Image (cartoon, rainbow, N blue to C red):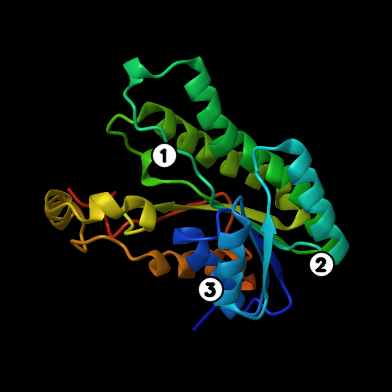
Amino acid sequence: MSADLTGRVALVTGASRGLGFEIAKRLAAGGATVWLNGRDETALAQAAQAIGAGAKALAFDIGDDEATRAAFQKIAGESGLDILVDNVGNRDRRSFGQLDRAAMQAMLAINLVAPFDLARRAVPLMRERGYGRIVNITSIAAEIARGDVAYTASKGGLAALTRGLAAELGPDGITVNAVAPGYFATEANAAMVADPAIAGYLGRRTSLGRWGEPDEIAGAVAFLASAEAAYITGQTLAVDGGYLTHF
């Protein structure tokens, strides 16, 4: 069963495929109207059609200040907003020695600065409606590391932003939490999913012994977005098949 989100309005970034699409689909199944964000208008339209009733495509680049401002004007004018899911993430797997200042700034712009800006724009709309849920999609890399320095730092920053916003927005009744995915079999990870060595590694390294399926993250987000999670804030829920607790 889906969490009851009847009458709620959500914005999910990076919702045309993968984890974002599954999250948007679950929120819509719970009764929410869901704005699907991404940069590809065609892909977003197809995703909204696949989800059906309650799904609305809204193409804009979260790294573009003017485009983001215009998108929130549209949301404010048409529906208001109760739920923000920051799912978009950038990744640069190059080693520390191959990165430069520009690469680090680009990573932080999408993985940390943009979620801050989206929250800044979303909170006034949530206050107007008397309900607010922000769910940031971080990563198990926010807690542990195996290189991937820029991504690890940016997701660690997003986890800290989650805690800071939770403390500041609590008096408004707005909760801010994070979901930290482990290894998920998304389109972006297709090459890794096809690698038997990685499957073997996850078989040994995770408690459940396998890749996560994209729809297996959606329930956690829907719960945190619902009234049932009204007294949960500033927390990070790992959805990782036991990766962080298994050794």
Is residue 85 visible in the rendered image? The answer is no
Measured as percent of width and height from the top left, residue 77 is found at 88, 61
Measured as percent of width and height from the top left, residue 30 is found at 59, 79
Question: Callout 3, which amino acid?
Answer: Arg
- Please tell me whether mark 1 or mark 2 is closer to you in this view: 2
The residue indicated by pointer 2 is 79
Question: Tag 3 or tag 1, which sits nearer the N-term?
Answer: 3
- Separation (CA) of disc 1 from disc 2: 33 Å
Question: Callout 1, which amino acid?
Answer: Ala
Pick the front one: 163 or 205: 205
* Residue farthest toward the bottom in the current orientation of the protein: 1
Query: In the rendered view, does 158 fall on the left or right side of 128?
Result: left
Q: Residue at x 35, y 32 (%)?
A: 93
Do labels 1 and 3 touch, CB within 8 Å? no
Q: Residue at x 20, y 56 (%)?
A: 194
Mark 1, Cα crowd under 10 Å, few <14 / some 14-19 / many 20+, is some
